[in-house]
Each structure stands twice: as structure tokens, then as C-alpha cells.
Image: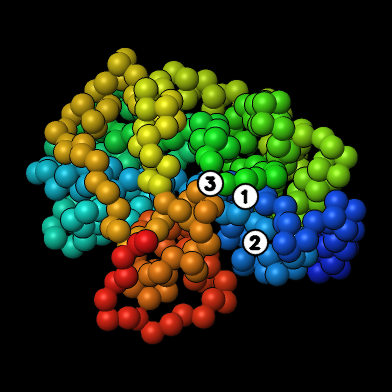
């Protein structure tokens, strides 16, 4: 296949669905005893709903939406830290657009901008570095956010700042790692999973070898999947085929993009600039050991956490918001009591309704879930 429309062919999709149904019959899965398959990446969640894939699958397949949206797993206290930096005199705070409206305990970055802070949306950390060159009398901070997908671009920007001698640029580093996240999910007593759709963008950087523990120790199959409809359907078929044959392996459906060994230049930049944090706090998942990175001492002058005083306080989510349960796959977004009423993309209570990769945003936009009238009071979580 060469063109995107070839990955959206209706007849090929119908053929794949029929093959999935055959495998379900052979495995003897039913709606009462479904196979739970987690798509780790929020990009897959949106593809599934955008193209109506969940409705095409037999009732014995239950898709579970995972924590692969980096904006969604950012704890509220880290948003408060962003706002604290942005509101300091002389600071230009730069961020990707999907982080602008994530709520903190007091306000979001968008609200901080409305209140007078110089918060600017950028498309890459290099845009932030260009701002630092143009504004030598200002401190320019880039909100480094994302899994291994975006780590290399931030690391390369730090290396470029060092090479150019730019001292008024720094990174507020909130980059996170995928492997400890999946391990935390597998260790969760609340959730039973039969297989994983592996994240395509992260795997483009790290390759497939880091996932081997999923098959070797947890005996679960994973298929690294692309994001087009036929990619997702073929990957689900590959998972079912492994289950039918009694195998648990890491397979790569997204071979046109994902190299088995990863991207060596990207991994080298990441290793040079970052080191693992001892632990990092995640929304809904709590503290996970070695799940985040920070800037190494050699590049401390580019580390916003060392340049600026930040609150660094752990803030609990609102009791009515059930983002944590949705992130872990325990609840579907529509099962949250404030979904579509008090929590909408226009008035989000939680990050999952804000990000383009958030499960709640996907359900709201594509899920066809009936939205009720807004109640007079926000119900408390049980």
C-alpha cells in the first residue's frame, strides 16, 4: 500500500472483521467471557472511534483504553508548577497546544495567559529555542512533555542550545517512559488483560525489544500497531491468532515505520541529555518508579526545575472526576458521572477531556454516547 486511502478500504476491513469473527468462534469468546485488549496509545483510541471500529468487532472483543496520552497522565500539581513558572516576571512559557487547557488546581495555562502571563503555543521545541534567540532579555521555558516519541526532539534542542551558547532557554521536563507504565498496568489487581495493541509512535523510537518482558514474564501478546483502520484491525487479528495458537509474543504490524531495533540517533540524544527519575507521579496511577526522566547535571543550566522556584506540591483530582479509573481501563469514559455534563471539551474537569488523544474526548467526539442535561450539582465519586 502506498496511499492512506488504501488503509481505509471498506472491503478489506470487512474481510478482516470476518477473520476476527472466525478466530473468536474458535477461541470460544463471548460477550459474557470477552477478550480484553488494551490499546496503550491514545492515537489508537481516536482511530477506533473515528472509524467506528469498535462497533464492527464481535461482542467477544472488549477494547480497553490505556494511559498512552501523556497530557492525560500529567498530575494536577505539575500543571500548577507550569503556571507558577509562566507567571514569573520575564518568562515566556512555551507549550504544545494540547497542554494549554489541562486544568490545574487554580487555573490552566490558557487561563494564566488570559490573566497576563506570556504563554505561547509552539509546534516544536526548536520554535521555543528560536524565541530565546529573538528575546535575549527574556527567559524562555519549553514544557517538555510526552513519552519517548517527543523526548528526542527536546533532547536535540537542548544540545543545539548548548552548541549555540544560548543561556536563556530551559526545559520544564515532564517526559515519561512507556515500559514502567505497562508494567504498572499489568500489576494492577483491578484489571485483567489478554493482549495489547502496542504504541506505534513510541516504538518508532525505542523499537520492539523493550516490550519482551510482557510476553516472557506476563505471558501476554502485544502487537505494535499503526493508526489506520486496517492497521488496527489487522493487529487485533494478529493478537487473536496468537491467543488461539497459545503463543505470547511481541509482533510488529507497523513495519513500514517501526524498526525492530529503534532509532539509534534518537536514543543516543535521549541518553546524553536525560537520566531516569527515581519515581514520577502519574494521574490515576500514582507514583511509578523510574517512569520519568530529568535533565542530567551536565545540562543543569537548561533545566527549568533548577532555574525557577516551583511549588512541587501533590494535588488530588476533584472527587467528581474519575480520570484515574478511565486511565487504568477500569471505567469507560461514559461511565464517569460527570462525562458530557459538567465535564465537556469546553469545560473540562479532567485532562482526558482536553487532549486530542484523551479517551473521554474520543468518546465525546465520536462515540455517539447520549449526553444528558447538566445536573444542578456535581455528583461525588463513589
Q: Nearer the viewer, mark 3 or mark 1?
A: 3
- Please give the residue where the numbered disc 2 appears in the rendered image: 48
The secondary element bearing badge 1 is classed as strand
Q: CA distance from mark 3 to mark 1?
A: 17 Å
The secondary element bearing badge 2 is classed as helix
User: Dot 2: within a 10 Å radius of its alpha carbon, few (fewer than 14), some, or many (20 or more) residues?
Assistant: many
- Please give the residue where the numbered disc 3 appears in the rendered image: 190
Residues at marks 3 and 1 touching, judged by CB atoms closer than 8 Å: no
Residue shown at the point (42%, 74%) measured from the top left: 340
Side of 289 where 268 appears, left or right: right
| Residue located farthest toward the left when viewing the structure as drawn | 89
Residue shown at the point (30%, 53%) measured from the top left: 317
Residues at marks 1 and 2 touching, judged by CB atoms closer than 8 Å: yes
Position of residue 358 measured from the top left corner of the image (x, y, whole percent): 48, 57
Which disc is residue 102 wearing?
none
Position of residue 159 measured from the top left corner of the image (x, y, whole percent): 39, 24
Above or below, 59 against 96 in this view is below
- Please give the residue where the numbered disc 1 appears in the rendered image: 39
Position of residue 16 measured from the top left corner of the image (x, y, whole percent): 85, 59
Amino acid at each position: 500500500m502506498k496511499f492512506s486511502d488504501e488503509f481505509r478500504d471498506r472491503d478489506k476491513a470487512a474481510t478482516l472483521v470476518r477473520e476476527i469473527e472466525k478466530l473468536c468462534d474458535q477461541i470460544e469468546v463471548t460477550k459474557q467471557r470477552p477478550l480484553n485488549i488494551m490499546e496503550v496509545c491514545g492515537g489508537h483510541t481516536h482511530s477506533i472511534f473515528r472509524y467506528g471500529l469498535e462497533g464492527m468487532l464481535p461482542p467477544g472483543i472488549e477494547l480497553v483504553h490505556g494511559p498512552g496520552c501523556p497530557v492525560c497522565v500529567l498530575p494536577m500539581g505539575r500543571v500548577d508548577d507550569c503556571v507558577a513558572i509562566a507567571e514569573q516576571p520575564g518568562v515566556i512559557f512555551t507549550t504544545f497546544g494540547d497542554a494549554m487547557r489541562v486544568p490545574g488546581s487554580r487555573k490552566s495555562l490558557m487561563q494564566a495567559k488570559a490573566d497576563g502571563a506570556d504563554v505561547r503555543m509552539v509546534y516544536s521545541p526548536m520554535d521555543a529555542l528560536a524565541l530565546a534567540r529573538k528575546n535575549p532579555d527574556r527567559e524562555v521555558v519549553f514544557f517538555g512533555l510526552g513519552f519517548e516519541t517527543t523526548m528526542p526532539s527536546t533532547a536535540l534542542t537542548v544540545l543545539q542550545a548548548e552548541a549555540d551558547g544560548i543561556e536563556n532557554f530551559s526545559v520544564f521536563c515532564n517526559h515519561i517512559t512507556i515500559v514502567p507504565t505497562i508494567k504498572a498496568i499489568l500489576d494492577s489487581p483491578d484489571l485483567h488483560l489478554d493482549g495489547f495493541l502496542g504504541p506505534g509512535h513510541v516504538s518508532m523510537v525505542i523499537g520492539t525489544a523493550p516490550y519482551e518482558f510482557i510476553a516472557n514474564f506476563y505471558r501476554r501478546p502485544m502487537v505494535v500497531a499503526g493508526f489506520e483502520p486496517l492497521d488496527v484491525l489487522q493487529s487485533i487479528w494478529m493478537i487473536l491468532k496468537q491467543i488461539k495458537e497459545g503463543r505470547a509474543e511481541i509482533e510488529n504490524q507497523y513495519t513500514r515505520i517501526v524498526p525492530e531495533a529503534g532509532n539509534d540517533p534518537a536514543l543516543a540524544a535521549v541518553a546524553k541529555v536525560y537520566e531516569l527519575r527515581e519515581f514520577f507521579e502519574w494521574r490515576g496511577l500514582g507514583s511509578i518508579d523510574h517512569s520519568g526522566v530529568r535533565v542530567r547535571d551536565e545540562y543543569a543550566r537548561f533545566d527549568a526545575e533548577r532555574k525557577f522556584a516551583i511549588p512541587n506540591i501533590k494535588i488530588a483530582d476533584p472527587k467528581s472526576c474519575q480520570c484515574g479509573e478511565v486511565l487504568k481501563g477500569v471505567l469507560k469514559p461514559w461511565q464517569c458521572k460527570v462525562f458530557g455534563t459538567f465535564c465537556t471539551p469546553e469545560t473540562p474537569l479532567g485532562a482526558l477531556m482536553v487532549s486530542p488523544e484523551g479517551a473521554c474526548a474520543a468518546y465525546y467526539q465520536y462515540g455517539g454516547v447520549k449526553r444528558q442535561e447538566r445536573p444542578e450539582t456535581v455528583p461525588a465519586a463513589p
